[in-house]
């Protein structure tokens, strides 16, 4: 009788709900994957910026790297003093930074007259017809300069420095970052 009619429609309703839930689940997975990729790109960019800023801070005689590491550990790191407030403290920090730099740079110090990493990377990219990744640039510089210890992070920081100075352009393709020289007109105005 009429008792048999509702069963197929209830089954069809459940099948339709399950299909809709499955589609929503897959859509949400894709959204989360896209967001995760964006956040990973942002994290890589922030880590690169941190490295560049840390090196700039060291060059300018700012807070030693150890303080930043202490903050990550959460063990009550000292708050850095205001710039220029105490010349003795600043001189002590500069000496401490210089002492640490000496031990770290013993691997491959830059000799007088050698080009900087920024000069090497911009010169290499200037001779290329296509954008290159930091790893590709590092590999080429390793071949071209076997006497210097080439590290991808140093090359990446130099490339980012070139971008900051307007000498290079950065382009992203998915999660990959590529670098190329800027147009001659914009490079001339940036100098």
Image (cartoon, rainbow, N blue to C red):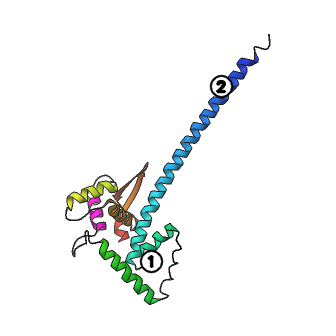
- Kindly identify the residue that appears in the image at 26 percent across and 55 percent down: 139
- Reply yes or no: does residue 113 show up in magenta: yes
Q: Quadrant of the C terminus?
A: bottom left
Q: Is 32 situated left or right of 169 in this image?
A: right
Q: Residues within 10 Å of mark 1 (few under 14, many from 20)?
A: many
- Kindly identify the residue that appears in the image at 72 percent across and 20 percent down: 9
Q: Secondary structure at mark 1?
A: loop
Instruction: Kindly indicate whether the residue at mark 2 contacts the one at mark 1 (C-beta within 8 angstroms).
Output: no
Q: Is 113 situated left or right of 167 in this image?
A: left
Percent from the top left, x then y, of residue 147? 19, 65
Which residue is disc 1 drawn over?
63
* Foreground residue among 177 and 78: 78
Which residue is disc 2 drawn over?
15
Q: Name the residue furthest front.
A: 75
Q: Residues within 10 Å of mark 2 (few under 14, many from 20)?
A: few
Percent from the top left, x then y, of residue 159? 35, 62
Q: Quadrant of the N terminus?
A: top right
* Foreground residue among 44 and 118: 44
Task: Specify the quadrant of the image occupied by residue 182.
Answer: bottom left
Q: Is 25 situated left or right of 151 in this image?
A: right
Q: Secondary structure at mark 2?
A: helix
Give the CA separation, mark 1 to mark 2.
Answer: 63 Å
- Reply yes or no: does residue 114 show up in magenta: yes
Mark before the other along the chain sequence, 1 or 2? 2
Relative to 102, say whether 121 is above or below.
Answer: above
Percent from the top left, x then y, of residue 134? 34, 57
Q: Name the residue furthest right.
A: 2
Read off the magenta span: 108-125
- Kindly identify the residue that appears in the image at 66 percent across and 27 percent down: 16
């Amino acid at each position: 009788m009429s008792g048999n009619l509702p069963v197929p429609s209830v089954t069809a309703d459940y099948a339709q709900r399950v299909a809709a839930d499955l589609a929503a689940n897959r859509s949400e997975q894709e959204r989360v994957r896209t967001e995760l990729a964006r956040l990973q790109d942002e994290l890589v960019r922030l880590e690169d910026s941190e490295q560049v800023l840390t090196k700039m801070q060291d060059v300018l005689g700012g807070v030693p790297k150890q303080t930043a590491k202490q903050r990550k550990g959460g063990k009550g790191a000292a708050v850095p003093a205001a710039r220029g407030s105490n010349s003795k403290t600043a001189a002590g920090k500069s000496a401490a930074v210089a002492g640490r730099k000496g031990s770290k740079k013993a691997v491959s110090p830059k000799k007088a007259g050698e080009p900087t990493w920024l000069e090497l990377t911009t010169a290499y990219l200037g001779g290329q017809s296509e954008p290159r990744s930091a790893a590709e640039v590092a590999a080429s510089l390793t071949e071209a300069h076997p006497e210097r210890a080439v590290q991808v992070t140093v090359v990446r920081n130099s490339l980012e420095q070139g971008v900051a100075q307007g000498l290079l352009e950065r382009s992203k393709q998915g999660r990959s970052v590529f670098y190329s020289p800027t147009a001659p007109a914009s490079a001339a105005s940036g100098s």
